[in-house]
Image (cartoon, rainbow, N blue to C red):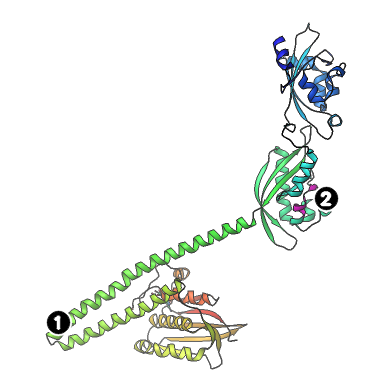
Amino acid sequence: MEEANQKYQQKNTLYAYLLLDEQLRIISPNPAFTKFTNIPQDELEGFTLASCFKFNSKSLNRLSNLPSILTESFGLLKLTAYSPSMDQGSKIFRYRFLLIENGDQEEARYRLLLTKYSAMDNEFRPEVSDKHLFDLLLRELTDAIYFKDLKGRFFLTNQLHAQKYEFSYQDFIGKTDFDLFTDEHAAQAWADEQEIIRTGKPLSIEEKETHKDGSITWASTTKLPLFDESDNIVGTYGISKDITQIKEVERELRRTKKLLEEANASKDRFFSIVAHDLKSPFSAILGFTELFAEMMANKEYEEALKYSSVVHQAAKRSFLFINNLLDWASSQSGRIEFKPGNLLLKPLVKDVFSLLATQANAKEVKLKTNITQGFGVFADKDMLHAILRNLVSNAIKYSRADDEIFIRAAQKEQNIEISVSDTGIGIPADKIPILFQLGEEVRTPGTNKEQGTGLGLIVCKEFVEKHNGSLHVKSIQNKGSVFYFSLPMHS
Ligand code: ADP
């Protein structure tokens, strides 16, 4: 014990050490104790522990029952207390005590070791009060801070918190989230707080915040239980950082990722189409032209004539295919310029019909339209031509003799709805949802076994979307199909 006494008598020790008598009166405090309490050593006589520190009622109770408490706790008691604020200016320090039984016979009944652990007091600290530091935090921090009581009523918030919601500080005080925000927002916050009060544990979450004007922001918030000086929970408090911009960047990243994935799928599709569709007609053209040359050499003109039309068909199909492929590839790489202008529908439809007349005549399919002189749209001429060409060409391809193909136009508010209908073989219901998806295989040979590329409708869809419209289809098997889309009206 003497050794311990000597150790704690040194000037610079961080621990205060003293002895206490039966009544907890202070005997032989060390210099650190005087420094801690600011009470000169010679004036300490007669002071009790309770007159130097502020204990909560639970600790006071324990101190007044010391002998039995110490017996229960093996002669050792840990306590926390605060310096009385009056003695230390505005500062309140928190201390930890270790009280040890010193033996029955001694005048010094107990030994006490204590240390400050609030770490507020150090030689590096400029002359600033805790209050000033706290005010600075509230005023300058770029995060929103609030304090609420147990009933969820705000009793302190910083300027930023109030400004964020375009309320004044006064608007907040005494109000709950239910008074200020939407029920959804308030109910979620209330549930979080009840959880924190129940468990005494902090919560870190991402929150959606609703504002007076209906706008929404996002915040990353840490909510904590608010303990008073006696370690009782008296409310909650939170600090939240605005992450709306981060959220937007995240959304943009996800969108870009999706676009990149789509672009990659387009590229894969492009190569697989080129590999398959362009190669096979060329093998036919090469094989047949070789045969053709042989037939000419052998003067088999009849046969040669027959094969020449096969070669012609294969070459025509490749040409149409290349056209579609180039349209599609250019639209994919953004190389097709979108140049909308005022257009009359009638001449355009006439042009498409005459282009496809041979195809239609060969199948005995009729091409009709209700479009009169007056219908005008605001669209890109080349794109609209490609859309109609593809839809009518498909309609012919999937029609039988005596079927009819109709291009109709009707005004719907400020738009013109155009439809291409046929009375052909129709599309099975399960294929409709994937008709316009790249990478999905929907390829039906035509009624004359015409082969397709599966690109036509995708090109149509992209071109319609460039006009901010959308392409839809309705179809019944064996009855026919209708493809329709809207374009803005002639201005
Ligand atoms: P393709 O070159 O294969 O015709 P499209 O993209 O133009 O490519 O059409 C894709 C598929 O949609 C076709 O293979 C066919 O199954 C179906 N389809 C398109 N238009 C019609 C139509 N008018 N009637 C029936 N089926 C159609």
Which is more toward the observer, 424 or 283? 283
Residue count near mark 1 (Cα–Cα under 10 Å), binned few <14, some 14–19, many ≥20: few
Q: Position of residue 459 (x, y in %)?
A: 44, 75
Residue linked to disc 2: 173
Which is more toward the observer, 72 or 306? 72
Q: Position of residue 220 (x, y in %)?
A: 65, 50
| Residue drawn at the location 25% of the way across and 76% of the way down | 284
Q: Which quadrant of the render holds ligand 1?
A: bottom left
Q: Is residue 212 left or right of residue 277?
A: right
- Sequence-wise, the earlier of marks 1 and 2 is 2
Q: Which mark is residue 294?
A: 1
Q: Give the quadrant of the N terminus.
A: top right
Looking at the rendered structure, the kind of residue marked 2 is Ile
Residue count near mark 2 (Cα–Cα under 10 Å), binned few <14, some 14–19, many ≥20: some
| Residue drawn at the location 21% of the way across and 79% of the way down | 288
| Residue drawn at the location 45% of the way across and 65% of the way down | 263
Label 1's element?
helix
Residue 79 covered by magenta stretch? no
Which is more toward the observer, 400 or 412? 412
Q: Quadrant of residue 428?
A: bottom left
Label 2's element?
loop
Which region of the structure is painted magenta? 154-162
Q: Residue furthest top?
A: 105
Q: Give the quadrant of the C terminus.
A: bottom right
Q: Position of residue 476 (x, y in %)?
A: 47, 76
Looking at the rendered structure, the kind of residue marked 1 is Glu
